[in-house]
Amino acid sequence: MKPIASIMLAAAALATPGAALAHPIIVERDRGLPIAPNNDSNSYWLDFKTDISEAKRELKSDLRRATDDEDRRDAREEYRSEIADAKHDYRKEMRERGYRVANFREDRRFSLR
């Protein structure tokens, strides 16, 4: 039993630095900051939700007008870019105000296909 425990301990010790080094700047910078309020009391959250809604409407419109696979790829790429930009902007605003963004609540049912 003792050899198995020491092997598991060694494996855990080797795995931990990898997880800690994955995003060391974010971990250090955001340590101890309160989580940003992702609700309607936060005007930046409302702006983020509006940007997401607008991106979805634009994607639907672009896909309806698409005539070939390249048009559909372009529409999906533009959608992904707009979503990434909205997330970046929201994170930046929250960081400037002393908050960290734990995660995003997104509508996972919305499909790009």
Image (cartoon, grey):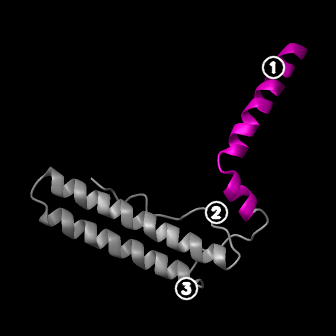
Residue at 69%, 69% in the rendered image: 35
- Does 113 appear in magenta? no
Q: Position of residue 55 (x, y in %)?
A: 34, 71
Q: Residues within 10 Å of mark 3 (few under 14, many from 20)?
A: few
- 3D distance between C-alphas at marks 1 and 2: 33 Å
Point out residue 41 in the picture as x, y percentages from the top left corner.
60, 85
For image coordinates 83% across by 27% down, the residue present is 9
In the image, residue 84 above or below residue 53? above
Q: Is residue 9 magenta?
A: yes
Q: Are marks 1 and 3 in contact (CB under 8 Å)?
A: no
- The kind of residue tagged 2 is Ala
Q: Which mark is residue 7?
A: 1
Callout 1 secondary element = helix
Q: What residue occupies the far left of the structure in this picture?
A: 67
Helix, strand or loop for disc 3: helix
- The span picked out in magenta is 1-30
Q: Earlier in the sequence, mark 2 or mark 3?
A: 3
